[in-house]
């Protein structure tokens, strides 16, 4: 018997297929059906699949999710997004033009994927066919079959976009048990520069499943800074995958913070394809309650003199589980590659768990490669010191956790945004006479 | 270069590649229940053991071969292997004098001290040739101290109650594919029992030799240390050079009770195959120590230079409070060798400690993988682990890989892991050469330095042998 | 006698030494001074045989033998010793073991009996006293975690043990305080003999107050541009290297 989740998606697809954007395109129709077939055949990954060892999704197959219908009203945007100049908002897996702004002088080419599905020339078709066809595991299949929207974004060669572009992914939570999917492509042409801030959040405590797969391509000399703040609701399941390709001398800087969600998988799959390409990837998982977050970073060094630095920090409280897998791969011939990774974790409760897997795969001798991982606690001496200076235990812990995360949180741009993130993470440091917030 | 010369050169590199011409009692290839009954019968085993073997066999039939993430491996035809081969001896030798001189010569040639040298070295040796133990030295001296050191077959005959009590309690036959196969067909191995409070007066050593063609070697070792006892055990292994692969699937079980300590050292030098990767031993071994008692200690030290493929993870189950486990490893792969080795440290008891030092050396087209698990269970209050994992690459066609798994479920545990990858730098080589040391010796010196932390865990004799082996195995790796 | 004739050396295609001439007879101490980037370390490395230093013209002879055709280890056995400016760390290799190996390789080549561990230790201790160190240095990994000063002392210890015939000291004074400098100098002075030649490469004159050279040469832009007695070093210390450039420009203008 076919599992409820698979059956549910099959039924939903059958009901809604004709209404999907681009249904009239035979190639796209076929592609969606093939990928749905492939998904149903493989099913969700279980514990025996190495990449999903600590985050088996098989159990989810017993639940069912419906695809969103009609357009939902977006929940109010969090305050730091009020004043931003460039923002692209997606609600329940659909582009929401009424909430988005992108002035014409932004020097960025943007189109919602749904629009391109309906109407595209040969060149565009090539791009989106590749986008929808990429990847070969269950998550890729599921997302490609059911994603009806997303973003296509391009910064032309040599352009330097001054204002960051905020990408807002949110669930309306107007009804329980919805599933939404987005797929996107971001291209930086030669020498282009862009800053992106991704926001993931939703409007309630209903169960929800979402998947977001983005491909990001940096041509030679392009630079991208990407910050993510993921703050989904307590019953949200988010499966996100970002594939990044960096050509010669391209520079990538990612800061990814996972704070919300019930079950979250965040993948950053990076390929340094050109000489001297550089990736700097840092992240935080701050987990409480029954949260489970699985952060995956992979850096593949294909060319000479590529370099990478990966730093992740996990904090697990209550019954939460922080999982991290970081793979550094150096291909044969990638002389002069330098690659480092650290995974440091605080395990703060007897019911919590930390699992970390730092992996090195080195196929060349002329390289510098190292990784380190630790799991430990807050320093009791430091806790005592702070308390002896009048801080409550709660505050003292918040201060020390804040200090543990500082080398990553310091990377957050814009004080207003940083403050917001910090308060959402319970890391604000009130002075002792200023009254305690808990 | 003539074939003869080539052969000579290869033989120099693998010094133990000779074959002993001796009549062998060999069971035809193939495996079914009748073969298992036959092995059991030849060894005059009690009914319960035959049954245990058969249960293991039936379970094995239901299992699948593991899928190796990092190994390229030719499929193994389990019906083409002979599961029992023994040198023909007229009767079971009661002393060294009764052992076939050809066998003694073989071990003499391998440098295994069975005679006077044994006395000088102060090491008691159990020598295993193909499927059976041919000689065990120093038995009387050990017996005086209350230590039992004998072949596994003898233990089954003489101390069945001990064997029955402990066999399969650390590595059950259901554990994994190769452990199940071993449980069904194991032929011989060593048995050690150190009674309460006894510090074993000698180093114990087993020397494994595969000689016959188309056979597998499936030995089983069981070491029990009672309260407060101590033993240091060493094993060495070699095989002739053959073009086809041979399977070696051993199981080792260690049991340490309260305050007991077991040091287990291996210098593994099975035939690695030739430069193109033809032949060589498939070394698929399950080794596990159970620190059952409080403050018990188990320490694994291994130097792995041989075998075409090595797949082994000597592990410690840290059950007793304040028990400790250590793993010190040097693994070298040259030419087409592949090694996937590491350890598992399972922290169950309070204030348990573990330490892992792994040194991988890859040369030629060798692929070297460290795979390790550190698991801290909720009960393991105050557990500590420190892991250091270093790889040295020599040449640009080899690979070094590190796959640690760290799983922590106790908020008072501290686990630290670090890994580095490096190569021998031009600066280091030049520095040595400018002090008069030529390139090959400089490489040996630097590699020796890289392995120092592990070598110092080995008894002196073994440390020297290990160093020599490494130098020999690396011949031609640079330049 | 060390003889360098019209030596041209390139590194990665860039010419560094451009026609260097130098003669250092046995029994003498010669100092090479010069501004940064003049090619001082290049000269040291070429003498020791480091890879990547390409001789494009000229010769180096030691006692009439062609030095450049020898591998670095052959030069060491022949009695050439370079005290490195930045000695490399080789983790895990015991310092005493390394030094004893090097000493015995040389003794073996000379047909002398090898030193056993006890004899070696006795000899090493004597020399350690000379440079104000103790056994501790010997028991550690080769330069592993050594401070700058410890590395330099270890180089001098090696020199004292290996008793070279031509010793090249590459900026051995850099990074040493005055007490350490004195000890290092006393080590060198202890080794001075009619059989030995020294080439002391330094940027500053202060080392030469303690190791008084027979000759001082100034290396600039890849050539010896001036030579003289110990007073030349003092003049350089007072007036810097500027006046030499002046003088050269003047002579080039005339020529």
Image (cartoon, grey):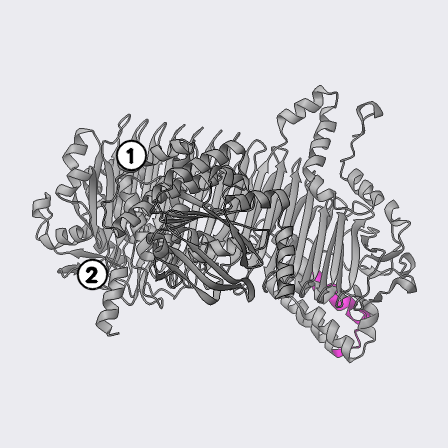
B384 on left or right of A436:
left
Q: Say if B323 sits above or below B245 in the image.
A: above
Does residue A149 appear in the picture of this structure?
Answer: no
- CB-based contact (under 8 Å), mark 1 and mark 2: no
Q: Position of residue A192 (x, y in %)?
A: 78, 64
Q: Is residue C51 magenta?
A: no
Q: Residues within 10 Å of mark 1 (few under 14, many from 20)?
A: many
- Residue A117 occupies which quadrant of the picture? bottom right
Give the residue at mark 2: B18
Residues in magenta, as a range: A8-26
Query: Looking at the picture, how far across and down is residue A331, in whole percent?
Result: 54, 63
Where B420 sits versus A436, above or below?
Answer: below
The residue lying toward the viewer, choosing from B396 and B454, is: B396
Q: Nearer the viewer, residue B18 or B137?
A: B18
State the count of labels: 2
* Percent coordinates x, y for residue A430 in the rendering: 80, 29
Does residue A317 appear to the left or right of B196 in the view shown? right
Q: How far apart, in angstroms, are the residues tagged by discs 1 and 2?
A: 32 Å
Report which residue position mark 1 lands on.
B231
Tag 2, which secondary structure? loop
Q: Residue at x 65, y 51 (%)?
A: C242
Q: Residue at x 19, y 33 (%)?
A: B142
Residue A225 seen in the current view: yes
Residue lying farthest to the front in this orientation: C254
Q: Main secondary structure of the magenta part?
A: helix
Q: Chain of mark 2?
A: B
Q: Position of residue A108 (x, y in %)?
A: 84, 65
User: On the image, which quarter does residue A205 sit in?
Assistant: top right
In this rendering, the label closer to the viewer, 1 or 2: 2
Q: Secondary structure at mark 1?
A: strand
């Amino acid at each position: 018997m076919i599992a409820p989740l698979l059956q549910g998606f099959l039924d939903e697809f059958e009901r809604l297929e004709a209404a999907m954007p681009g249904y009239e395109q035979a190639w796209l129709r076929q592609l969606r059906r093939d990928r749905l077939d492939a998904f149903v055949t493989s099913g969700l990954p279980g514990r025996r699949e190495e990449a999903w060892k600590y985050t088996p999704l098989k159990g989810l197959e017993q639940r069912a999710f419906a695809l969103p219908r009609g357009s939902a009203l977006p929940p109010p945007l969090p305050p730091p997004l009020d004043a931003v100049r460039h923002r692209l908002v997606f609600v329940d897996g659909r582009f929401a033009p009424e909430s988005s702004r992108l002035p014409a002088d932004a020097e960025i080419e943007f189109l919602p994927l749904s629009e391109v599905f309906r109407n595209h020339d040969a060149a565009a078709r090539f791009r989106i066919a590749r986008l929808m066809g990429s990847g070969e595991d269950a998550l890729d299949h599921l997302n490609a079959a059911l994603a009806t929207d997303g973003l296509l974004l391009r910064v032309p060669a040599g352009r330097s976009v001054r204002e960051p572009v905020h990408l807002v992914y949110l669930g309306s939570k107007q009804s329980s048990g919805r599933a939404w999917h987005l797929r996107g492509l971001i291209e930086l042409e030669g020498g282009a520069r862009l800053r992106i801030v991704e926001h993931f959040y939703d409007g309630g405590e209903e169960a929800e499943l979402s998947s977001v797969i983005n491909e990001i391509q940096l041509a030679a000399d392009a630079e991208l800074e990407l910050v993510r703040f993921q703050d989904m609701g307590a019953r949200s399941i988010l499966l996100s995958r970002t594939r990044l390709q960096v050509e010669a001398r391209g520079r990538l800087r990612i800061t990814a913070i996972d704070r919300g969600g019930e079950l979250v998988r965040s993948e950053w799959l990076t390929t340094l394809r050109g000489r001297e390409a550089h990736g700097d990837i840092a992240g935080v998982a701050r987990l409480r309650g029954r949260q489970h977050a699985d952060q995956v970073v992979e850096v593949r060094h294909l060319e000479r003199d590529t370099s990478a630095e990966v730093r992740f920090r996990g904090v697990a409280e209550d019954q939460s589980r922080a999982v991290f897998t970081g793979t550094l791969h150096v291909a044969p011939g990638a002389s002069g590659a330098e690659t480092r990774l650290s995974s440091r974790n605080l395990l703060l409760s007897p019911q919590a768990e930390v699992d970390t897997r730092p992996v090195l795969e080195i196929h060349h001798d002329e390289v510098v490669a190292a990784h380190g991982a630790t799991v430990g606690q807050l320093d009791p001496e430091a806790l005592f010191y702070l308390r002896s200076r009048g801080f409550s235990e709660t505050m003292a812990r918040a201060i020390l956790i804040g200090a543990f995360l500082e080398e990553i949180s310091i990377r957050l741009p814009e004080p207003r945004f940083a403050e917001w993130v910090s308060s959402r993470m319970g890391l604000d440091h009130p002075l002792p006479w200023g009254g305690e917030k808990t | 270069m003539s074939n003869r010369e080539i052969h000579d050169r290869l033989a120099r590199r693998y010094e133990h590649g000779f074959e002993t011409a001796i009549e062998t009692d060999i069971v035809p290839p193939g495996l079914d229940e009748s073969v298992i009954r036959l092995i059991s019968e030849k060894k005059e085993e009690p009914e319960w053991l035959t049954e245990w073997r058969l249960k293991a066999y039936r379970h094995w039939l239901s299992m699948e071969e593991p899928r190796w993430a990092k190994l390229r491996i030719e499929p193994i035809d389990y019906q083409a292997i002979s599961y029992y081969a023994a040198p023909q001896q007229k009767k079971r030798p009661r002393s060294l004098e009764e052992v076939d001189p050809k066998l003694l010569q073989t071990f003499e040639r391998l440098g295994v001290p069975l005679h006077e040298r044994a006395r000088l070295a102060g090491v008691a040796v159990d020598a295993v040739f193909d499927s059976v133990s041919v000689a065990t030295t120093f038995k009387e001296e050990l017996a005086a101290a209350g230590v039992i050191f004998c072949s596994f077959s003898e233990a089954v005959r003489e101390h069945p109650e001990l064997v029955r009590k402990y066999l399969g309690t650390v590595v059950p036959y259901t554990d994994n594919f190769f452990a199940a196969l071993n449980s069904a067909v194991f032929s011989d191995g060593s048995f050690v029992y150190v009674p309460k409070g006894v510090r074993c007066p000698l180093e114990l050593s087993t020397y494994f030799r595969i000689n016959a063609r188309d056979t597998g070697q499936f030995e089983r070792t069981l070491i029990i240390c009672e309260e407060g006892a101590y033993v240091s055990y060493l094993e060495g292994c070699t095989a002739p050079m053959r073009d086809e692969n041979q399977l070696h699937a051993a199981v080792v079980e260690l049991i340490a009770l309260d305050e007991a300590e077991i040091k287990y050292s291996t210098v593994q030098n099975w035939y690695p195959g030739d430069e193109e990767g033809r032949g060589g031993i498939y070394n698929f071994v399950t080794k596990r120590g159970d620190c059952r008692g409080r403050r018990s200690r188990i320490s694994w030290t291994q130097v792995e230079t041989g075998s075409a493929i090595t797949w082994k993870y000597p592990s410690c189950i840290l059950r007793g409070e304040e028990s400790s486990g250590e793993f010190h490893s040097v693994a070298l792969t040259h030419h087409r060798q592949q090694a996937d080795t590491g350890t598992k440290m399972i922290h169950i008891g309070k204030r348990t400690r573990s330490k892992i030092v792994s040194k991988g050396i890859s040369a030629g087209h060798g692929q070297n993988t460290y795979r390790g698990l550190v698991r801290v269970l909720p009960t393991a209050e105050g557990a500590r682990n420190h892991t250091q994992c270093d790889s040295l690459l020599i040449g640009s066609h080899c690979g070094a890989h590190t796959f640690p798994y760290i799983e922590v479920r106790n908020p008072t545990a501290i686990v630290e892991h670090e890994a580095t990858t490096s190569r021998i730098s031009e600066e280091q080589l030049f520095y040595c050469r400018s002090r008069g040391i030529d390139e090959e010796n400089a490489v040996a010196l630097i590699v020796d330095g890289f392995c120092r932390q592990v070598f110092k865990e080995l008894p002196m004799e073994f440390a020297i042998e290990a160093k020599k082996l490494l130098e020999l195995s690396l011949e031609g790796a640079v330049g | 006698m060390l003889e360098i004739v019209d030596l041209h050396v390139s590194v990665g295609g860039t010419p560094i030494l451009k026609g260097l001439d130098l003669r250092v007879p046995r029994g003498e101490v010669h100092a090479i001074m010069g501004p940064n980037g003049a090619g001082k370390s290049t000269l040291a490395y070429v003498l020791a045989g480091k890879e990547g230093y390409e001789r494009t013209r000229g010769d180096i002879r030691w006692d009439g033998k062609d030095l450049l055709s020898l591998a670095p280890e052959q030069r060491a056995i022949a009695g050439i010793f370079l005290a490195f400016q930045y000695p490399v760390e080789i983790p895990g290799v015991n310092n005493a073991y390394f030094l004893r190996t090097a000493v015995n390789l040389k003794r073996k080549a000379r047909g002398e009996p090898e030193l056993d561990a006890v004899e070696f230790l006795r000899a090493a201790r004597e020399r350690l006293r000379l440079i104000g160190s103790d056994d501790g240095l010997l028991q550690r990994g080769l330069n592993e975690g050594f401070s700058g000063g410890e590395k330099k002392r270890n180089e001098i210890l090696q020199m004292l043990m290996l008793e070279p015939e031509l010793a090249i000291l590459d900026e051995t004074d850099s990074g040493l305080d005055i007490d350490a400098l004195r000890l290092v100098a006393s080590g060198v002075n202890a080794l001075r003999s009619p059989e030995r030649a020294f080439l002391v490469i330094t940027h500053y004159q202060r080392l030469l107050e303690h190791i008084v050279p027979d000759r001082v040469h100034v290396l600039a832009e890849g050539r010896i541009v001036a030579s003289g007695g110990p007073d030349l070093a003092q003049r350089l210390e007072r007036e810097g290297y500027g006046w030499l450039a002046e003088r050269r420009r003047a002579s080039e203008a005339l020529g």
